[in-house]
């Protein structure tokens, strides 16, 4: 049986390795790669003195004072890829012997309840590593494999690297290191606080992924934005101590940049507003239909508009491509509502709007615009329609917003 991590895009069923596993008659075999700085936190193999079994040593198992030694890639030269080959008959023997389970060592990790919020409740996560099963098998072995067998996506560092031109896709759809990198992947170190979640990287690369094929090391401290016109060469370090993301473009070669005082977005800088859920905002087939006075309440319209953007983005739509259409029938509060939608659209990454003159667009007109064929950058990805009954209305009349 071959087992691997789902986030290892280099893990494929290699028949040569399968043949080696079968001919060596090993009970369990682990694929290992040569360690680089990108892998210094990866688990490595050691030999247990008691029974000479191979064991897997993970970073979370190390005492704080041993962390530096653990990450020494000259001392521990190989790491576990978690590509594992297992003899099922030997696995069954262990399960039967141990009463229906495999006695794996427990790993304790300090986490927070909300991974996006370091100030949220601290918890201890208990887990086991499937690679640690190597210590349970008599006659287990390890094999050193090329780097092409390991292309993980565990952090934003890995995702940025794999999306860049430092990797290419083979004819059989495997991501492999670009030969132009000379066999050594660039070392990427994005700010662990600012780029903890994928959404942060998506925002930072909304204009495209930068070129890393000529980069040796990229270190980022603080929030920055990059694009397809950004090209990192050699050893580059970028610092931004301000609370506003700064854009980095063009060729940057062997440089230490401090962009803290660079011009930012100015009036277009998004702000975060704390709010709370509002009952009754689930739209029907014709949108959200409420009295205008409710739409005018604090954060009511904002909550609904943001929920629409959240749903659209979560569904895979890149709102930075294409056009957002906005219009309505000219009723009371429409001008103010349209301004709110535009501002929130910009904050969510929308770059192009199609708005009816004076905010006027009938529902059939909006439908026709959305269906119109056009280049991707111009074609509408959706619309907000502000309509309802056939009178201009007022604070007490009904209003409908359909996103």
Image (cartoon, rainbow, N blue to C red):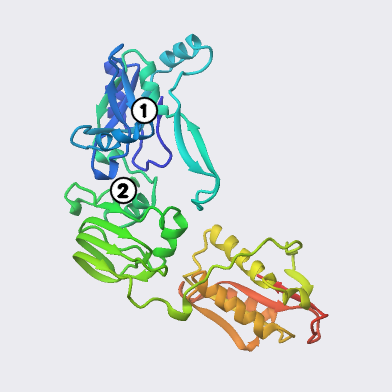
**Residue sitting farthest toward the front:** 65
Q: Residues within 10 Å of mark 1 (few under 14, many from 20)?
A: many
Q: Could you tell whether 384 is left or right of 284 in the image?
A: left
Q: Looking at the figure, which quarter contains the C terminus?
A: bottom right
| Residue drawn at the location 53% of the way across and 39% of the way down | 123
- Please state the horizontal and vertical placement of residue 326, each as a whole percent of the image: 61, 79
Which SS class for mark 2? loop
Q: Residues within 10 Å of mark 2 (few under 14, many from 20)?
A: few
Q: Which residue is mark 2?
A: 171
Q: Could you tell whether 295 is left or right of 135 in the image?
A: right
Closer to the chain start, of discs 2 and 1, is 1
Classify residue 288 by image quadrant: bottom right
- Please state the horizontal and vertical placement of residue 310, each as a whole percent of the image: 58, 62
Q: Is residue 40 above or below residue 161?
A: above
Q: Which residue is mark 1?
A: 84
Q: Nearer the viewer, residue 186 or 11?
A: 186
């Amino acid at each position: 049986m071959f087992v691997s991590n789902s986030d290892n895009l280099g893990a494929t069923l290699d028949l040569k390795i399968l043949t080696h596993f079968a001919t060596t008659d090993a009970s369990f075999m682990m694929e290992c790669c040569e360690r680089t700085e990108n892998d210094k936190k990866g688990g490595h193999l050691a030999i247990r003195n008691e029974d000479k079994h191979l064991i897997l040593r993970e970073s979370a198992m190390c005492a704080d004072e041993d962390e530096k030694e653990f990450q020494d890639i000259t001392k521990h030269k190989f790491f576990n890829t978690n590509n594992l080959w297992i003899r099922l008959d030997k696995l069954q023997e262990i399960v039967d012997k141990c009463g229906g389970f495999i006695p794996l060592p427990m790993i304790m990790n300090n986490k927070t309840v909300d991974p996006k919020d370091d100030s949220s409740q601290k918890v201890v996560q208990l887990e086991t590593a499937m690679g640690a099963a190597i210590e349970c098998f008599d006659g287990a072995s390890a094999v050193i494999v090329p780097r092409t067998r390991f292309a993980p996506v565990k952090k934003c560092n890995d995702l940025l690297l794999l999306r860049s031109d430092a990797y290419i896709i083979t004819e059989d759809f495997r991501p492999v290191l670009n030969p132009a990198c000379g066999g050594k992947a660039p070392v990427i170190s994005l700010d662990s606080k600012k780029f903890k979640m994928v959404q942060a990287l998506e925002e930072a690369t909304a204009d495209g992924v930068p070129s890393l094929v000529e980069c040796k090391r990229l270190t980022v401290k603080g929030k920055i934005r990059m694009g397809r016109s950004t090209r990192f060469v050699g050893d580059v370090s970028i610092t931004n101590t301000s609370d506003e993301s700064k854009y980095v473009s063009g060729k940057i070669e062997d440089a230490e940049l401090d962009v803290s005082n660079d011009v930012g977005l100015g009036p277009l800088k998004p702000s975060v507003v704390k709010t709370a859920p509002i009952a009754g905002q689930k739209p029907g087939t014709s949108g959200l239909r409420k009295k205008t006075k409710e739409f005018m309440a604090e954060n009511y319209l904002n909550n609904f508009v943001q929920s629409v953007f959240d749903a659209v983005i979560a569904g895979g739509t890149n709102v930075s491509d294409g056009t957002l259409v906005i219009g309505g029938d000219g009723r009371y509060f429409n001008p103010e509502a349209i301004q709110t939608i535009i501002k929130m659209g910009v904050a969510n990454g929308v770059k192009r709007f199609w708005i009816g003159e004076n905010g006027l667009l009938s529902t059939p007109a909006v439908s026709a615009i959305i269906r119109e064929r056009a280049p991707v950058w111009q074609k509408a990805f959706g619309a907000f329609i502000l309509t309802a009954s056939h009178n201009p209305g007022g604070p007490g009349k009904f209003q409908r917003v359909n996103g």
